[in-house]
Image (cartoon, coloured by chain):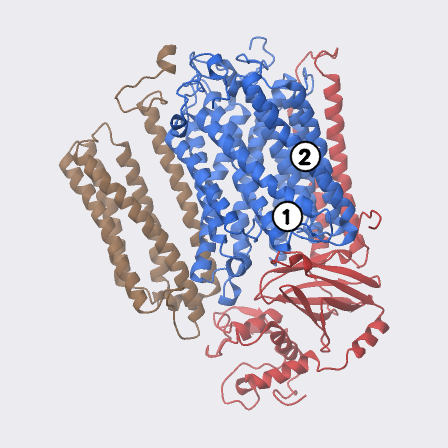
Chain colours: A red, B brown, C blue
């Protein structure tokens, strides 16, 4: 049994500022609470039955007092709200240069996929000092990815991608918890995040062997599952262009426009009739039930790698 | 008002419950109670309408396709049936207030009959949907790219029309019971609160249908 | 009912008349129905408490060896379901509200006595279904029934629990309907709205929330049943549905539900503080509008349960702002109760001890709610023990303390007997300490990162867990004590006069216990809380 700590280790770029906000909030609560407690104790003693204190006169005009403490409380609450607003927005906005790692949660384990193809179960190796962006999905029920040392958490949903980002600022091993009740072994769905100096991390990546990168796996799937049959360069069928698709605006048949992010790519594969590209017939079959989440992530990684039109779709990498 | 009269209200057989001070308080309480109950019914159906709206926004084309599988003819007849029944129940209540017992009995009886007719017509709809394999969880099987959305539509369709039909059944039964009691003289110009409040309930059932009909039946049929 | 020595009490009181079981089970008297409810509420409190005992015993050891994971998961689910729907939500309204509302407005009964009795039967029927689910093997979804776990993965006892809660929901709706109509139409002449005691305002406001929120729960539960039974895809992403839709629908009800739990408590506290400080409540008008404000704005904040659920950033910001707004009326009430003590004539009888405990613990819990309402802080704290500590502070430190305070305060009126003040004060103080020892360590566990609903945990959390479980054992004793001395008082307690506390309020102008028709002589209406007038 360790000694009594008050906080988890401070291990991410946002953690010190979150802790500062937390202690500000605690201080605010303490000040108000102590103020009220002290007032209650003072009044209870002074005006206890049988005491000599004068009860003459009423409470006087009370509206000023009531309005004052209403507005002062409200002002303090709003200060807390605004400070939190800025931090929350930051938590929701990953830096542009963040490296992406894919997480698939399932009862009751975490599967990690690095872009270079390295896979881990219940462990996530990350480099120190670099922003990391996790794209996460679940294979079954809702889970939640929580690393107390980083102060980050995000629910992981089936059928959708959610994201979380952090920059680790301390090397070491930190617990990872599932924190959305997900069934029998919810409490066993624990892992670790291992933060290494960048050189060590690169070394670790190499040491995992060199399986195909995630994008290479995706390319193989693209061929083997028949995607290139319609989306390949010489396909007979009129299908949307996939080169440079990722990150671009797409015009849909109902007149709206979306940005082709990871969610869009996944939905196009699994729920193709949800959003139909303008000018195309809704003839793409759904691959729901035929691909598991790891394979979809591989395809997504592959499509993300198709930055330039020169890359030949369907050709061997 | 003497203390005795205030606190020990012995109303005998004048139809006023003993915890009320007088008839007008009892009437006011009953009417207000019915309005509060109707508010809860609106919220109850509101969840279904909210879910329907959200799914419709997610799958506009799918829902349009699905809506065309519903029977517009039967749906229209059902709408006419319910609207007529609401008119009849109003007229029946008025006849009661004018002490025209036979007319009131006939009108209330017709209201109940139309209510049951609605259920029969809806039964035909359900039967047809059964033969076309449109019942999720039972025999749903549809082809085409919009099949998922159609299934979702029909899930909501059965939930909404199912709960609505349950309310129609309850309402029609209550009105039938009231018809019998009116025929036996249980109500008159000075005693008809129960009929009035049941009519209110029937109007709510009708109004809910007025939302159901365009949302479910007419959506995919414009243009 | 023979434990109450009815022969010794004044002849025509509501307890003494027709004492048979049938008479009790077919009663239309709101006072008897309140007692029937109290028996049910007490039973379910100890049933939910037994589940909590299992949970805290298991958590003494980090490896959680006492219970299997399956049993543990079913235990915390059962604890949540029973405590929320069969204890907290009904508690004060169906016991104290049922008993006191007609008395406080000078009426002979509620507007719809038969519906009142039906409400009790529905409540018991709902409870029966829930117990059936337990006997059938239990449910492990958590009281929140998140999809797709509850619809696709959990066992089929979910149906039984869902039906139980659905039925109990109608009990709540009928009670709320009854209270609203009664308050509107049956106030005695001269009793205008702003002369009403704050307890009546609390019952009225909570009834509005009950009546508007509970139907949403009913339909959401029906949709879970449909989804399980018919394979409907509203919430299942594999079928094109949205699991977040369930969360929105569920929390749209469940957030107002927590205000249903706290508003009646606030009403009770206002009555007690006014009586034992012998002052009218400070800022009566602000107090009434605060309650209405809490009830109304409480419908707009549900998304603060979903900051990390995957809902959009903008939704999170709006829900956060509204959540901060709803804290303001609660803060006003705490300040006003404190100010009521000023120039008062304060005594520290047991009800007052409960009330003072409430003010402190509710305020503390409420402020930690503010911490959670800040989304950036909610990110590390959501679904950890910090949240558990927060809601237990407001619900147990708040609502339960208020319920017990109210039971003690009105016990003489309801039963005609006085309880042992020494034991009552001891129990109240023991409860306060036991409560803090149980739940304060949980705030610390939460910030340290211990997730909730964990059957086992990392060893570094053990010390705080042991402290918490130790506190729970003290709390258990403190809850059992009132059962003992209150029951004892029914037979051996001194007889209470009409107004043992020398309180204001119409209920104290009739005998203890009251007669069947509540008043034998028409009560006198005056300003609410006329404590500065010498005549009672």
> Do the residues at pointers 1 and 2 share their chain?
yes
Q: CA distance from mark 1 to mark 2?
A: 34 Å
> Left of B186 or right of it: where is C356?
right
Instruction: Identify the image quadrant of residue B121.
Output: bottom left
Q: List the residue tagged with mark 1.
A: C320
Closest to the observer: A39 or C293?
A39
The residue tagged 2 is: C475
Q: Is residue A49 visible?
A: yes
Percent position (x, y) of residue C362? Answer: 66, 34
Q: Is the residue C233 above or below the residue A99 in the image?
A: above
Which residue is at 30% across, 44% downward?
B203
Numbered disc 1: secondary structure: helix
Q: Is residue B222 visible?
A: no
Element at badge 2?
Answer: helix
Point out the frontmost of discs 1 and 2. 2
Q: Residues within 10 Å of mark 2 (few under 14, many from 20)?
A: many
């Amino acid at each position: 049994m360790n000694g009594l700590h008050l906080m988890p280790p401070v291990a991410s770029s946002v953690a010190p500022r979150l802790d500062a906000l937390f202690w500000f909030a605690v201080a605010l609560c303490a000040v108000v609470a102590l103020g009220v407690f002290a007032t209650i104790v003072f009044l209870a003693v002074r005006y206890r039955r049988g005491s000599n204190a004068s009860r003459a006169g009423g409470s006087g005009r009370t509206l000023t007092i009531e309005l004052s403490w209403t507005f002062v409380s409200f002002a303090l609450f709003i200060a807390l709200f605004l400070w939190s607003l800025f931090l929350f927005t930051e938590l929701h906005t990953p830096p542009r240069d963040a490296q992406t790692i894919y997480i698939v949660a399932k009862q009751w384990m975490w599967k990690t996929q690095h872009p270079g193809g390295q896979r881990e179960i219940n462990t996530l190796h990350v480099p120190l000092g670099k922003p990391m962006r996790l794209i996460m999905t679940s294979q079954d029920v809702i889970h939640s990815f929580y690393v107390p040392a980083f102060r980050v958490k995000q629910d992981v949903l089936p059928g959708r991608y959610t994201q979380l980002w952090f920059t680790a600022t301390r090397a070491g091993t930190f617990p990872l918890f599932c924190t959305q009740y997900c069934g029998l072994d919810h409490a066993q769905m624990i892992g670790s995040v291992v933060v290494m100096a960048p050189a060590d991390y690169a070394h670790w990546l190499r040491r995992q062997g060199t399986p195909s990168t995630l994008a290479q796996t995706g390319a193989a799937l693209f061929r083997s599952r028949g995607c290139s049959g319609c989306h390949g360069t010489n396909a007979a069928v009129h299908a949307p262009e996939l080169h440079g698709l990722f990150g671009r605006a797409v015009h849909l048949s109902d007149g709206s426009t979306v940005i082709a992010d990871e969610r869009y790519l996944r939905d196009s594969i699994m729920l193709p009739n949800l959003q139909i590209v303008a000018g195309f017939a809704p003839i793409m079959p759904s691959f729901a039930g035929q691909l598991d989440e790891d394979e979809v992530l591989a395809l997504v990684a592959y499509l993300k790698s198709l930055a330039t039109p020169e890359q030949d779709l369907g050709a061997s990498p | 008002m003497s203390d005795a009269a205030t606190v020990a209200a012995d109303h005998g057989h004048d139809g006023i419950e003993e915890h009320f001070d007088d008839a007008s308080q009892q009437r006011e309480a009953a009417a207000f109670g019915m309005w509060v109950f109707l508010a809860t019914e609106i919220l109850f159906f509101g969840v279904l309408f909210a879910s329907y709206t959200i799914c419709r926004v997610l799958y506009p084309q799918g829902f349009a396709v699905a809506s065309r599988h519903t029977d517009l003819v039967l749906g229209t007849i059902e709408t006419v049936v319910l609207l007529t029944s609401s008119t009849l129940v109003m007229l029946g209540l008025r006849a009661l207030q004018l002490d025209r017992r036979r007319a009131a009995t006939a009108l209330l009886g017709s209201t109940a009959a139309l209510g049951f007719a609605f259920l029969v017509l809806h039964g035909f709809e359900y039967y047809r949907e059964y033969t076309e394999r449109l019942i999720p969880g039972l025999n749903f099987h549809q082809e085409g790219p919009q099949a998922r959305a159609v299934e979702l539509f029909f899930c909501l369709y059965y939930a909404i029309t199912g709960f609505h039909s349950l309310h129609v059944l309850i309402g029609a039964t209550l009105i039938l019971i009231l018809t019998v009691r009116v025929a036996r003289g249980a109500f008159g110009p000075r005693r008809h609160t129960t009929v009035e409040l049941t009519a209110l309930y029937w109007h709510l059932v009708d109004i809910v249908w007025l939302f159901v009909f365009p949302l479910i039946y007419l959506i995919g049929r414009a243009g | 009912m023979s434990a109450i020595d009815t022969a010794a009490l004044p002849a025509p009181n509501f307890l003494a008349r027709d004492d048979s079981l049938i008479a009790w089970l077919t009663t239309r008297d709101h006072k008897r129905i309140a007692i029937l409810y109290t028996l049910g509420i007490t039973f379910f409190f100890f049933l939910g408490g037994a589940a909590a005992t299992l949970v805290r015993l298991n958590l003494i050891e980090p490896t959680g060896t006492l219970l299997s994971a399956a049993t543990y998961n079913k235990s915390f689910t059962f604890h949540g379901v029973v405590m929320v729907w069969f204890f907290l939500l009904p508690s004060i309204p169906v016991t104290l509200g049922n008993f006191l509302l007609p008395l406080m407005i000078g009426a002979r009964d509620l507007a719809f006595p038969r519906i009142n009795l039906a409400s009790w039967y529905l409540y018991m029927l709902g409870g029966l279904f829930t117990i059936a689910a337990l006997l059938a093997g239990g449910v492990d979804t958590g009281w929140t029934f998140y999809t797709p776990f509850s619809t696709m993965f959990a066992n089929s006892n979910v149906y039984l629990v869902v039906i139980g809660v659905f039925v109990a929901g109608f009990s709540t709706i009928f009670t709320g309907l009854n209270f609203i109509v009664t308050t509107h139409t049956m106030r005695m002449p001269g009793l205008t709205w702003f002369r009403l005691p704050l307890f009546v305002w609390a019952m009225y406001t909570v009834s509005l929330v009950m009546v508007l929120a509970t139907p949403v729960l009913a339909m959401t539960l029906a949709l879970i049943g449909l989804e399980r039974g018919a394979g409907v895809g509203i919430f299942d992403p594999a079928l094109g549905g949205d699991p977040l839709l369930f969360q929105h629908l569920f929390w749209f009800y469940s957030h107002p539900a927590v205000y249903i739990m706290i508003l009646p408590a606030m009403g009770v506290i206002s009555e007690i503080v006014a009586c034992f400080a012998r002052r009218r409540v400070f800022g009566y008008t602000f107090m009434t509008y605060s309650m209405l404000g809490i009830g109304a704005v409480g419908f707009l904040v549900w998304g603060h349960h979903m900051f990390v659920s995957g809902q959009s950033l903008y939704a999170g910001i709006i829900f956060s702002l509204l959540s901060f707004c709803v804290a303001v009326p609660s803060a006003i009430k705490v300040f006003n109760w404190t100010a009521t003590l000023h120039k008062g004539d304060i005594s520290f009888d047991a009800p007052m001890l409960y009330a003072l405990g409430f003010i402190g613990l509710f305020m503390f819990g409420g402020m930690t709610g503010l911490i959670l309402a800040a989304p950036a802080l909610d990110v590390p704290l959501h679904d950890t023990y910090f949240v558990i500590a927060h809601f237990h502070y407001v619900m147990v430190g708040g609502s339960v303390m208020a319920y017990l305070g109210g039971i003690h305060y009105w016990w003489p009126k309801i039963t005609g007997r006085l309880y042992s003040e020494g034991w009552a004060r001891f129990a109240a103080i023991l409860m306060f300490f036991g409560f803090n020892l149980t739940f304060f360590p949980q705030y610390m566990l939460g910030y340290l990162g211990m997730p909730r609903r964990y059957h086992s945990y990392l060893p570094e959390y053990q010390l705080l867990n042991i402290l918490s479980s130790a506190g729970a054992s003290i709390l258990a004793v403190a809850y059992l004590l009132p059962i003992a001395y209150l029951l004892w008082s029914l037979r051996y307690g001194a007889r209470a006069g009409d107004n043992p506390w020398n309180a204001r309020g119409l209920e104290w102008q009739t005998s203890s216990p009251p007669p069947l028709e509540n008043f034998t002589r028409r009560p006198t209406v005056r300003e609410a809380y006329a404590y500065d007038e010498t005549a009672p």
